[in-house]
Amino acid sequence: MSTTAVFQTISPINNQVWLERPYASDKQIAVALEQATKAQQLWCKLPLNERIAYCQQAMDYCLSQQQAIGRDICWQMGRPLLQAEREVTVMVERASYMLEVAESALAPAQLHAKAGFNNRLVREPLGLVMVIAPWNYPLLTAINSIIPALVAGNGVILKHSSQTPRCAEWLAEAFKQAQLPEGVFQYLHLDHQTTGELLIANEINHVVLTGSVSAGKQVEQQLAGHFKTLGLELGGKDAAYIRPDADLKASVASIIDGAFYNSGQSCCGIERLYIHQDVYNQCLPMIIDAVKQYRLGHPEHQQTTLGPMVRASAASQVQAQIQQAIEQGAEAQLDSQLFINEVFGQPPLRINTANSAYLAPQVLTGVNHQMDVMMEETFGPLLPVMKVSDDQQAITLINDSDYGLTAAIYSQDNETTRNIGNQLAVGTVFLNRCDYLDPALAWTGVKASGKGYCLSAWGYETVTRPKSYHFKEQA
């Protein structure tokens, strides 16, 4: 099944090996499944308030280790240090909300009284949940499913990206410090083949994947005929639209942050922008000026606001998409030389060059929907901008996508925005903000952006099953 081969995590900061870890062996996997199965059967019988307390203590531990965890995130995937530390805070806030609503979300349904019957509708855990987490937000994406799964009474096995293995180890340490019963939460470092084999193991009842569309298709095909439940959060090509009545200064600031934060490597980051023709000429200079304020460099440097991409090959893919668009008539609005500053690299950084993960941000104009830059996921520090004549054209273009995760509208007309939102084929419609998950709302996508949902009180439905008690009682 698996081997004891070793994998390496290459840091994008210096393109050197940051750590090595062995893949889990066949024996380790077998033991993990056996332990998890036994532990879950006892775990689900604990009172709900005890399960909540264990999870809260684990989150408290993570918060106490915020700086160390942040530094690990920084070196594994390149995000500026202060922003990496912030992920710990947001993870704890998100988990705390899910713990807060757990009791009401998992409470038995209140049924109308029926003479002679005592009928109940309850929610039971699925059993073992396997969470496959990505590198771009290694804590947030994982915790979305881990906390509700555990609180609902499931066991969890986490398979994290080989780019961010320390995040799995930190979470395991947090639950250990919280004295979570042994075996309830475990992680396994796995290669792709072994991951696929583990998905269909009899012990696994539910699978959650955050990743690419191709990975989602592969998992769905592997699970076909195995009667397991599945949640997928996949790709995105999220759009923003600035209407003529928008607060332009606030809109541009929000969109630029949504497009370039985390070097554009965000599931719901803004990857295409439509601007109404009446304000296009006002907005474009503001956009260019805002992007010029970024400071690209070593992510541990305090002045750095834009770190490297996750790996050199990812940067090369974005550069290829930019070059292809330019060859098709698009115009680059920024000179990459603006971002080459030795102050932010020790030694001086190589930017926009082969075998370097450091990529200068870019804004493209003159784009259209015949270009990949407007249709295919970029996942990098790039924003293509397109002029539209009216709301209807914006709606048509936003929906002209294989993806449907989020869309952001910038306007001061609430009623018109609701009407626009009703016509958009996305999981979340934002007004005057973007690139944010409110844990009180269900996080979901349509089309190639995935299936299922997490977060909110509804998120507990995906890690439980309904069970009915139809009791005709004797008088």
Image: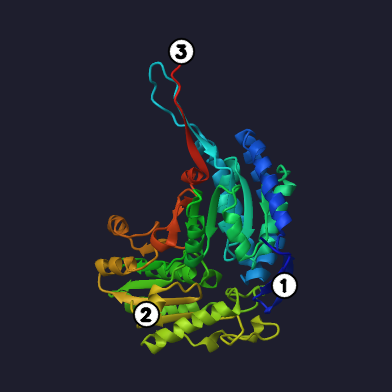
Q: Residue at x 35, y 83 (%)?
A: 366
Q: Earlier in the sequence, mark 3 or mark 2?
A: 2
Q: Which residue is identified by label 3?
A: 474
Q: Which residue is identified by label 2?
A: 371
Comparing 2 with 262, the one in front is 2
Task: Evaluate if marks 3 and 2 touch, with contact meaning CB atoms under 8 Å apart.
Answer: no
Comparing 193 with 321, the one in front is 193
- Disc 3 to disc 1, C-alpha distance: 68 Å
Local crowd size for mark 2, using a 10 Å CA cut-off: few (<14), some (14–19), many (≥20): some
Which of the labelled discs sits on residue 18, or is there none? 1
Quarter of the image for residue 370 reads bottom left
Give the structural element (helix, strand or loop) at label 3: loop
Counting from the top left corner in percent of width and height, residue 211 is at 52, 63
Q: Nearer the viewer, mark 3 or mark 2?
A: 3
Q: Residue at x 56, y 45 (%)?
A: 148
Q: Is residue 332 visible?
A: no
Give the structural element (helix, strand or loop) at label 1: strand
Q: Is residue 136 above or below residue 283?
A: above
- Disc 2 to disc 1, C-alpha distance: 37 Å
Q: Is residue 281 above or below residue 47?
A: below
Q: Quadrant of the C terminus?
A: top left
Quarter of the image for residue 417 reads bottom left
Comparing 125 with 169, the one in front is 125
Q: Residue at x 50, y 76 (%)?
A: 381
Which of the labelled discs sits on residue 384, or is there none? none
